[in-house]
Amino acid sequence: MQKLTAGLLFGAYVFLAMTVAALMWRGGMGVGAASAGLFGALGFAFSLHALISGAMGRAALRREVEGIRQAYQLLADAVESTQGSVAELAGAVEKGAVGANEALTDEVRILEDLVHRMSASLDARQAEAQASVTHSPDTFEGRRQRQAAALMDTVREALTDNRVDLYLQPVVTLPQRKTVFYESFTRLRDTTGRVMMPAEYLSIAEGEGLVPAIDNLLLFRCAQIVRRLAKQDRRVGVFCNVSPASLADETFFPQFLDFLRENADLRDALIFEMGQAAFDARGAVEARNMAKLADLGFRFSIDKVQTLDLDYADLQRSDVKFIKIGADLLLEQLLDLEGGPALASLRDIHASDFAGISRRYGMEVIAEKVEAERQVVDILELDIGYAQGNLFGEPRAIKEQVLAEAEPSSDFIRSTLQATQRRRRFA
């Protein structure tokens, strides 16, 4: 643009000089005077052009300098803003890392304590068994004690080495059959990868007094796994079994309560479940600890129902939100009454009103162990909106890689527990 302006000015100067020379020649001054006037006018024009070009160049330079200064200021502001963002990010990362390490330390501490307590119980049992075997190595009792000790060692190693699988069975809505909850089952694997069913070790564990320790470990493992699954889909709740022994354990329960308090977002994903007999037999300590869980927002479910003569007021006070009843029991005691009373304690409540009265107390009835389509039709007649059973899906194990991706710290926890076990053996 500046070159075009300079060219136009130069043309104007030449035209002006020629005009001056022509006027002088026409005025009778002669050719010499006209030539002198032409060159004089050109010299003056060039001098004036040099002054104007210099002024324009200096103005353009000032504009460029001002533009560079503004660009530098913008760059400096951007660098300062970036440094502030980096500092904030570093602080957030450091804070998050500290929080994660503290949470991980709490989990390791709970697991260490649980494994230590199980180890202490097993060591005492093994010492007794060894003393007994020394005196009568070939007796039936001696062989039974050796088998029990070996089996309990397998259980302890499975729990310590994190060979705990979670099996999930869907709980669906009726009649849509949309999965809204899952029933969880924990299973142990031995060193060969074979799944150990509870019937294999619970009978021996009961005789050895180890059921509370196993219940505590399985409950904590279940809560850990549910927490990982909840990161992927918080809309689905999981029923997890809790035993009265876990609720009454004065050492384990406070630690477990702290763990749940740190993971309060699990309140929508974790539903604690116990059998009807265990619920009815709970003591003051168990009831008080259930109330503490309810204060955190956790819900409860009752399964293994043997009688439909329920104490709704007591269930409501205990924050029970779900009642699981076997399909056979439901249909036997409700469908065949032909309009008769469903509950001995509520004679005015008819069979068709059973689900309705449960909802009035804030509880939903879930028909479980549904195996046939004809049962679904009868269950719908009773206005029951939830069902569970192999008809809708058998229990399936959660894939190991899913859990590994969801919680990469499991290897750290396992190695820490193994190191603790080794230190304990050599102590």
Image: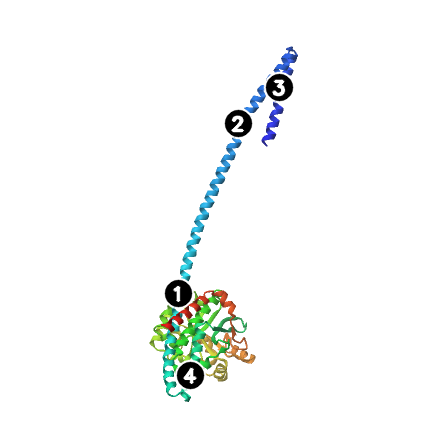
Q: CA distance from mark 4 to mark 2?
A: 107 Å
In the figure, 228 relative to 32: above or below? below
Q: Nearer the viewer, mark 3 or mark 4?
A: 4
What kind of residue is marked 4? Arg
Observer-nearest residue: 373 or 395? Answer: 395
Q: CA distance from mark 3 to mark 2?
A: 23 Å
Label 4, secondary structure: give it.
helix
Label 3, secondary structure: give it.
helix
Q: Earlier in the sequence, mark 4 or mark 2?
A: 2
Residue under pointer 3 = 17
Question: Badge 4, how many Cα within 10 Å: few under 14, some, many 20+?
Answer: some
Residue under pointer 2 = 55
Question: In x, y percent, where is residue 422?
Answer: 40, 71
Q: CA distance from mark 4 to mark 1?
A: 36 Å
Residue under pointer 4 = 146
Observer-nearest residue: 161 or 256? Answer: 161
